[in-house]
Image: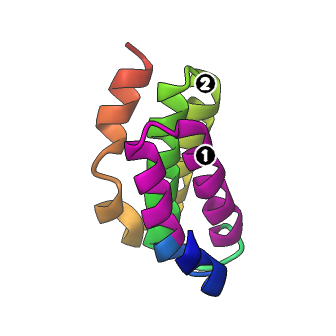
Amino acid sequence: SLALKYEPHDTVLRHQYGVALSRLGRAEDAVREFSEIVSEELKILPPRETLIMSLTTRIINLTRLGRTEEAREDLRTARDLLAQHPHLAHSAMRLDELEAEINA
């Protein structure tokens, strides 16, 4: 994306790009984008909503790719973060639904 060329560290922009890739059926590329965001966001304390959102969207795409164990690992990471940082709770609306899909 041209925008990312000029703002490579803008996690919101990168997340939007990952979502666009996901909608185009490019789940592997989307996972790469979300992974970059997660790596950067894990360095920031206290954690931000962007971390939970990126884990959530990475879970969605990992599930689409049949990479269930990786999706479960992300789900555990997200749950641990939520337990330690209650201020993120409102960012986690989809996690219950995703957990049900993964465990179905």
Q: Residues within 10 Å of mark 1 (few under 14, many from 20)?
A: some
Q: Residue furthest bottom?
A: 6
Q: Which residue is mark 1?
A: 29
Q: Tag 2 or tag 1, which sits nearer the N-term?
A: 1
Which quadrant of the figure contains the N terminus? bottom right
- Seen at 63% across and 60% down, the residue is 38
- Seen at 49% across and 37% down, the residue is 61
Disc nearest the viewer among 1 and 2: 1
Tag 1, which secondary structure?
A: helix
Tag 2, which secondary structure?
A: loop
Give the residue type that dot 2 points to: Arg
Q: Point out the stretch of residues depicted in magenta.
A: 14-41
Q: Is residue 81 visible?
A: yes
Q: Which residue is mark 2?
A: 67
59 left or right, relative to 29: left
Give the residue type that dot 1 points to: Asp
Does residue 100 sit above or below 78 in this rendering? Answer: above
- Magenta segment, principal secondary structure? helix
Please state which of residues 87 and 63 is positioned toward the viewer in this rendering: 63
Does residue 100 sit above or below 1 in this rendering? Answer: above
58 left or right, relative to 35: left
Does residue 73 sit above or below 80 in this rendering? Answer: above
